[in-house]
Amino acid sequence: MMLTLLLLPLATLYFFRIYENELVRQTELELIAQGATLAASYRQIMRLANPKSVDYGYVLGYSPLIPGQRRSYMRDETLDPYYTPITPELDLVKPVYAPRPDAIPTPQVADKFAQQAGALLTPVILNTQQVMLAGVRILDMKGLVVAGKEEMGMSLAHVPEVKQALKGYYSSVIRQRISDEPPPPLYSLSRGTHIRVFAAFPIIEGNRLQGVVYISRTPKNILKHLYLVQDKLYLAAGILLSLAVLLVLFLSSTLSRPIRDLIRQTQQVAEGELPYVQPLKSPVTYELAQLSESFASMSQALAERSDYIRRFASHVSHEFKTPLTSMQGALELLNEHIDSMPPERRQRFLDNLLSDTQRLKNLVNRLLELARADALEPSKQTSQLPELVRAMQNRYHERGLEIEADALPYVPLAIAPDTLETVLGNLFDNSLHHGASAVRLRAQPSPRQDSLVLSVHDNGEGISPANRERIFTPFFTTRRNAGGTGLGLEIVTSLLKAYNARIQLGSAQTGAEFILELALAS
């Protein structure tokens, strides 16, 4: 939108330049018409003054202005025995030449027929100059001035455009204009006010060059032209201004509407009316879409974290409440009946207290491990699965668990070695606790070829159908009496999540199978 608003004045300046260039073309076209008219008049006068005018002048081997020859001025190369049009060729993009060189005095004398024709044509030139505002010189076939207001009898044959015309070619140039008076300040905006168009039109009779019409004029001032069409300019300016206002209004509305929608959603989330911010349906711009997605993902993450903390706090309070209640009851009984209580019963209460204390200690340690897993900052370390499994095989062999691994691929995994060792250690410990004597590891690339799928399958008791849906619930355990806390798989899940990996329950019918999807290092 900003670029469009910027292009509006640039387009206006471009139109300004095109319009000014068209004024130069129009000036050249007028000079061509005037030159052709004066050339025709000169030839007619020459026919009357010189009965042998058909044999008068220099013979031209070739000229585009000779009827029946190839026209270099026409795009259509079809030969025509009658028409010899000339197309304007000046352009302000082309270089502007220096002011016209001065005429040179010469001892040569113009031909008498040329002088007679020039004398007859001079009054016509002086009268028409009052209307057409052009400087006109009629030159003979040697380049000497024979008609005009000034420079009579002097030579202009050294001027480049006149040289071309003496060879039978029409020529035109843009030259710098030197004025005796400084132009008004606003005129400096126009390049056309500092130039003058010169055109040299050859006078050809049959195939003979008889002279040259050298004519010049300053292009019409663009500011005067704009003043003459000021009504149209006001209309164009009004349209441009309206377009700019519409663009600004459209820009502000399209940007502010999604922002207001985003603000409304955040307020509803703060007041509890929405669980989290939804992505905008029509964000309009890529940046607003990114902002909307960022707000939505952040809001959803906060909602999930809040729900997790709420559920986690409920589970923790329940897990702590049970042993604390048991400990409180045992302490109250000991406090009231310690003297009359039989020694074996007193010892049983003390053993229960010690057991509950140990359970709380284990629970606190596991909670600390889970907290560290949740707050884990992933590192850029990579792991090689075969090396890690080989190091763990000896350790668990001594504990009665055989780790059988198929040909594991040597691919770098995007997870720190100590983290992967903790994950596999928790799974192997679970297998030991549930009566497994062997664990088989199998690995294969994922269908997307961007991760490694690792299967950990033991030969233990397995997981009952009733418990399969609850296996990843925090604090769920079938070994509560043996000191289990139910946080092992939750710790594994948090560690893997930090490295964009995940774990799920496999579909094995015997034993327990867990499927790990580990991202490959890029």
Image (cartoon, rainbow, N blue to C red):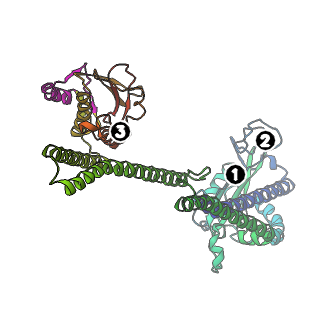
Residue 174, picture quadrant? bottom right
Mark 2 to mark 3 CA distance (whole Å): 108 Å
Q: Can residue 478 be seen in this snapshot? A: yes
| Mark nearer the viewer, 2 or 3 | 3
Could you tell me the amino acid type at mark 2? Pro
Q: Which residues are magenta?
A: 386-412
Residue 142 point in image, percent of width and height: 67, 56
Against 250, residue 59 (above or below) is above
Q: Earlier in the sequence, mark 1 or mark 2?
A: 2
The local crowd at label 3, few if under 14, some if 14 to 19, many if 20 or more residues have their Cα within 10 Å, is some
Query: Does residue 176 belong to the magenta stretch?
Result: no
Q: Is residue 308 left or right of residue 361?
A: right
Report the residue marked by disc 2.
67
| Residue in front for this viewpoint, 85 or 314 | 314
Could you tell me the amino acid type at mark 1? Tyr
Report the residue marked by disc 1.
170
Could you tell me the amino acid type at mark 3? Phe
Q: Which mark is residue 260?
A: none
Residue 261 point in image, percent of width and height: 60, 59
Against 511, residue 356 (above or below) is below
| Mark nearer the viewer, 1 or 3 | 3
Residue 361 point in image, percent of width and height: 21, 48
Q: Is residue 272 left or right of residue 203?
A: left
Q: Earlier in the sequence, mark 1 or mark 3?
A: 1
Report the residue marked by disc 3.
476
- Badge 1 marks a residue whose secondary structure is loop
Task: Identify the image quadrant of the C terminus.
Answer: top left
Q: Earlier in the sequence, mark 2 or mark 3?
A: 2
